[in-house]
């Protein structure tokens, strides 16, 4: 309630609040897809489509496309232009046979 030019009620303690981070949709999509990759929800070799990701995340195509581009650049996803997206199959790195460390 407003009383005499002041708002009555609880006062906010500005020193205890931290600034909110404004996250764009493509950052949110990136985080969600990366989380699905690291948690095993998306299996190695699994084929995905942009449309299926858009449908699952319930956001427009542009931020999902940007998130996928970033994940492809990082090597977390593989993309076949104009076709599909897939989760890469990871193979163990060859070990050194000479015992060097």
Image: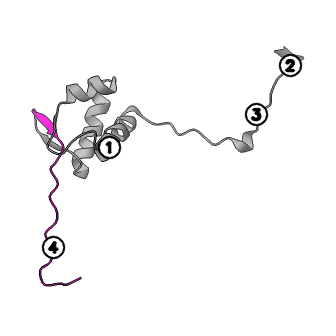
Along the line of sight, which residue is nearer the eye, 63 or 35?
A: 35
User: In the rendered view, does 85 fall on the left or right side of 3?
Assistant: left
- Secondary structure of the residue carrying numbered label 2: loop
The residue depicted at 32 percent of the width and 31 percent of the height is 63
Any magenta on residue 100?
yes
Nearest to viewer (mark 4 / mark 1): 4
**Secondary structure at numbered mark 4:** loop
Image quarter of the C terminus = bottom left
Question: Where residue 50 sits: x, y (%)?
Answer: 21, 30
Disc 1 packing (10 Å; few <14; some 14–19; many ≥20): some
Camera-side mark, 2 or 4: 4
Q: Main secondary structure of the magenta part?
A: loop
The residue singled out by tag 4 in the image is: 95
Q: Which residue is mark 3?
A: 12
Q: Is residue 29 magenta?
A: no
For discs 3 and 2, the disc positioned in front in the rendered view:
3
Identify residue for label 1: 34
Residue highlighted by disc 2: 5
Give the mark nearer the N terminus: 4 vs 3: 3
Q: Tell me the magenta residue range.
A: 83-101
From where the camera sits, is residue 100 visible? yes
| Residue under the point 16% across and 66% down | 93
Mark 1 or mark 2, earlier in chain: 2
Q: Earlier in the sequence, mark 3 or mark 2?
A: 2
Q: Are marks 4 and 3 in contact (CB under 8 Å)?
A: no
Q: Is residue 23 left or right of residue 26?
A: right
| Residue under the image location 68 percent in, 41 percent down | 17
User: Based on the displayed image, in which of its 4 quarters is residue 66 positioned?
Assistant: top left
Q: CA distance from mark 1 to mark 3?
A: 36 Å
């Amino acid at each position: 309630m407003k009383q005499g030019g002041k708002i009555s009620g609880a006062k906010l303690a500005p020193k205890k609040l931290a600034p909110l981070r404004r996250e764009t949709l493509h950052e949110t999509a990136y985080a969600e897809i990366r989380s699905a990759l690291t948690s095993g929800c998306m299996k190695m070799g699994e084929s995905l489509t942009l449309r299926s990701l858009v449908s699952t995340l319930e956001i427009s195509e542009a931020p999902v496309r940007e998130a996928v581009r970033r994940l492809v650049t990082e090597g977390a996803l593989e993309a076949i232009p104009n076709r599909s997206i897939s989760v890469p199959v990871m193979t163990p790195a060859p070990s050194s046979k000479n015992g060097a460390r």
